[in-house]
Amino acid sequence: MSIKSFESKVYLSSPTMHGDELKYIQQAYATNWMSTVGENINEVERIAAQKAGMQHAVALSCCTAALHLCVRCAGEELYGKSPLGHGALEGKRVFCSDMTFGATVNPVVYEGGIPIFIDTHPDSWSMDPVALEKAFELYPDVKLVVCAELYGFPGHLDQIKRICEQHGALLIEDAAEALGATLHGKQCGSFGDYCTVSYNGNKIITGSAGGCLLTNNIETANKARKLATQSKEAAPWYQHEEVGYNYRMSNVVAGVVRGQYPYLGEHIAQKKAIYERYREGFRDLPIRMNPIVEGSEPNYWLSAMTIDRAYMCEQTRSNTHATYIAKKGKSCPTQILEALAEHNAEGRPIWKPMHMQPMYLAHEFVTRNGSARQGNGTDVGADIFARGLCLPSDIKMTAEQQDRIIAIVRSCFE
């Protein structure tokens, strides 16, 4: 079957703007508040906290900055302030989500911590609570857990939180991809002791950049704001008593975020329709869409799929390249991604698990059966990575365009 390529590229997830954003950008311009203070920032912090059901939000330049400040503040809460030049987690182990983007984990290393990766639950694609319990058996001294939701689909965060409380550990929730999603009616970005959300250019709403740290502790919020503005002391000159950062959100970027927030629900509904159209279109294929945890309402940011093992053709991946051998009735992520690219559509592989990344190969990785580095248990994350890919999930994609995407994927199994 011949499928016509798209004249204009169909993106994975590009910004969807509405016009209100310009009003607030113009307001920043007209009032000359173009830097890191202003009404837009104040409003973003108010709205972000209110939406998440948290008491305080700190608007920052990106979600990675928010995660870094979460790690710094959590480390100081647990272990006290470190000497100048040393991280707050110097030499301390931290349990981290394995199947996620590197920004979830890297701030632990910024602060001198040692990530230990926790395997993925097959029915949520997020951290496995059973594997987390096993990790606490192996390393009972660990007092910090960093957990991310994947692609806007909540994992078993309520269980993760209970396990952390039982072991006296703090939880950092990376809800970068899950803004607006809920679990048992509770907003993602409110389960952790420290939480983050993202407004990156490809997220469910955007500021072109930016993120927020969310907390119920006023002292943490004030501490984060101070750290984000180079830790300046109240003095008539620039006085610094600890290392700080240039992490505050711009009032211009905040204007874009402020203009986007009213459309969050609309964007979620559109993303959900995309997910459901894919699910229906692949109903008779050996394909499974992102799993939905009972009691959760995802934001459906990225629609992703895995191919049933029996229908995988041979696929080989190195650190930088992938190849496959086509076989009738079977396919693989590499073949489908190449077919999408040939038709001017954008997809991408599932996040490559952190324990498979070259820089983290020496770090411990724990499955529900124990240390995977010692050969214990099935590597769920590696399996999902091998069989999975993210499909074009752009809100501006028409139903006709999505039908052609479905046809492209179907052709790979012919």
Image (cartoon, helix red, strand yellow):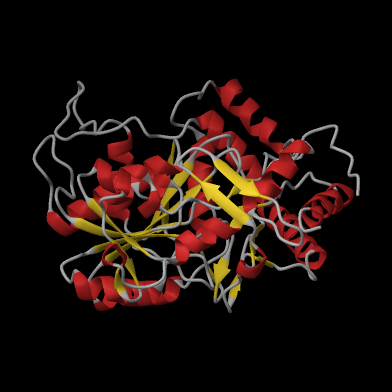
Please report the residue visible at 34 percent of the width from the left and 30 percent of the height from the top.
246
Asked if residue 276 shows in the view, the reply is: yes
Name the spot of residue 159 as percent of width and height, x first.
41, 77
Q: Quadrant of residue 235?
A: top left
Viewed as shown, does residue 95 lie left or right of 385? left
- Residue visible at 58% across and 59% down in the picture: 387
Residue ID at (47%, 73%): 156
- Considering every residue shown, the one lying at the far left of the view is 83
Looking at the image, residue 115 sits to the left or right of residue 92; the answer is right
Q: Left of 211 or right of it: where is 95?
A: left
Q: Nearer the viewer, residue 97 or 364?
A: 364
Q: Quarter of the image for the C terminus: give it.
A: bottom right
Measured from the top left, where is residue 255 in percent x and y? 59, 35
Percent x, y for residue 175?
A: 48, 56
Residue 300 left/right relative to 55: right
Instruction: Give residue 316's position: percent from left, percent from top.
Output: 54, 49
Q: Does the rendering let one see residue 68?
A: no
Front in this rendered view, residue 23 or 224: 224
The residue closer to the viewer here, 67 or 50, is 67
Image-quadrant location for residue 244: top left
